[in-house]
């Protein structure tokens, strides 16, 4: 599917500029689960280019997505 055919209408709009920062303190390992995840090469290259702990930044980006969709869909934040 070409990018132009992707429907983005259900994605919440950003309310302001996003400022990415270094992730905070690592969470205890019992909070994390190891998985195998396939991502596009350019996405992985971008995050790897941000330096050490790029996986924590990927997790932070996914967390923002989850929080935005929980709020919009009426889910309770945990």
Image: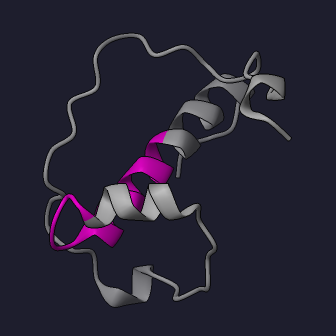
| Residue 9 sits in quarter | top right
Q: Which residues are magenta?
A: 49-64
| Residue 32 sits in quarter | bottom left
In this picture, residue 58 sits left or right of residue 12? left
Q: What is the total number of numbered labels drawn onto the structure image?
A: 0
| Residue 13 sits in quarter | top right
Residue found at x 13% / y 54%: 22
Residue found at x 28% / y 25%: 18
Residue with the most extreme front position: 2
In this picture, residue 7 sits left or right of residue 36? right
- Percent across and percent down for residue 6 are 79, 29
Residue found at x 41% / y 89%: 30
- Percent across and percent down for residue 48 are 29, 67
- Looking at the image, which is closer to me, 1 or 59? 1
- Looking at the image, which is closer to me, 72 or 77? 72
Look at the picture and state if 11 lies above or below 2: above
| Colour setting | one colour
Instruction: Look at the image and tell me in which quarter the N terminus lies.
Output: top right
Q: Let me know if residue 51 is in the magenta part.
A: yes
In this picture, residue 48 sits left or right of residue 64? left
- Looking at the image, which is closer to me, 36 or 29? 36
Q: Let me know if residue 8 is in the magenta part.
A: no
- Percent across and percent down for residue 64 are 45, 41
For the stretch drawn in magenta, the main secondary structure is helix
- Percent across and percent down for residue 63 are 46, 50
């Amino acid at each position: 599917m070409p990018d132009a055919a992707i429907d983005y209408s259900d994605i919440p709009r950003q309310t302001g500029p996003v400022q990415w920062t270094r992730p905070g303190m690592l969470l205890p390992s019992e909070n994390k689960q190891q998985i195998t995840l396939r991502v596009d090469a350019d996405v992985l290259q971008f995050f790897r280019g941000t330096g050490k702990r790029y996986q924590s930044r990927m997790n932070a980006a996914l967390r923002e997505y989850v929080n935005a969709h929980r709020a919009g869909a009426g889910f309770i934040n945990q």
